[in-house]
Image: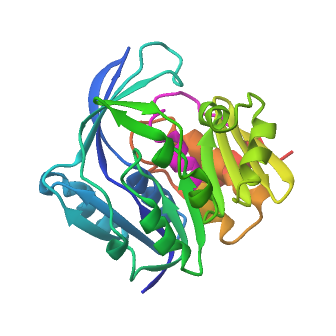
Amino acid sequence: MNYDIAFIGHYTKDTIVSASGTRVVDGGACNYGANVAIRMGLNVAVVTRLAAEDFHVVDRLRRLGVDVFALTTPQSTCLRLEYPTSNVDERVIYVTSTAGPFTPAEVEALQARAFVIGASMRGEVDLEVIAELGKKDALLAADVQSFIRVNSNGVLVPEPWPEKQQVMAHLDVLKTDAVEAELLTGETDIRIAAQMIADLGPSEVVITHRDGVLVYARGQFHEAGFFPEKLVGRSGRGDTCIASYVARRLSTSPAEATIWAAAMTSLKMEAEGPFCREINEVEELIRRKYQS
């Protein structure tokens, strides 16, 4: 079966610790992304790895209409996300277990118009898997955290990315946040950083930051702000943003896809867990905040 969009990445069991308390949330870029794309009316697939005890997430996605190709592993990827201050962009992420790396065989037969790679850390999706996806006639997008975040004695930390040029050569869209963009390029100005990243291969660069999203696509910049009425669900912000951008990009321009990504991400941040709102709510927010 040919899909509109396929997400590749681990389900993650996230323990979130902040001033408002401690809670466990079903996370993972594939989970956040699929919830967005299926509600946008697309034909969606997920390739993931997780423990049998967490298959309620697979069942939930399947009930929404997502085709999930899940490999059962001894343990799921479990993360502990600690927010020490009120600044939601300041966090420490601990790794307590992992579901292991994907293999090219897990994606070889899958066909889609777009693939979105959302790994939690380096080693989950390696260059062989990227190269296999690169053979397909499809838009290939990835979140840079999949490659620069490294499990260092149980803590996720950014490290230099030795395969940066090889991976970037396969990508059409790269998503990063402002901090990661500076780590990649040494530039604090996200516009300059976006141009430098595009020079490495991706034709479109999506950068999230505290106030919104910046897209650099084929020599042009597009920007849209975030307008959540309350900020509760920071975790999954970037996953929701890139999923909604790529999903909308399949049928429209980078400028419109940027607005959709910002609007959907704004609504997602009003609650923990994946986006679960109605599309008419996104359209209404766009009318109120993004159309002059």
Q: Give the main secondary structure of the magenta stretch.
A: loop
Q: Residue furthest front?
A: 162
Which picture quadrant has residue 225?
top right
- 149 in magenta: no
Left or right of 132? Residue 102 is left
Say if the magenta span includes residue 237. Answer: yes
Foreground residue among 168 and 245: 168
Looking at the image, can residue 103 be seen? yes
User: Percent x, y for residue 4?
Assistant: 53, 76
* Residue 164 versus residue 232 in the image, above or below: below
Which quadrant: the C terminus? top right
Residue 243 in view (yes/no) = no
x, y percent for residue 238: 54, 43
Choose between 71 and 17: the one closer to the eye.
Answer: 71
Q: Is residue 221 left or right of residue 13?
A: right
Give the quadrant of residue 200: bottom right
Q: Name the quarter where the N terminus is drawn.
A: bottom left
Residue located 69% across and 59% down the image? 202
Q: Is residue 118 above or below residue 91?
A: below
Q: Position of residue 282 (x, y in %)?
A: 61, 51
Return the residue found at the far bottom: 1
Going 26% across and 59% down the picture, which residue do you hit? 49
Foreground: 237 or 147?
147
Q: 59 above or below 180?
A: below
Q: x, y percentage for residue 56?
A: 20, 56
| Residue drawn 43% across the image and 67% down it | 128
User: What range of the chain is rendered magenta?
Assistant: 226-242
Colouring mode (rainbow / by chain / secondary structure / one colour) = rainbow
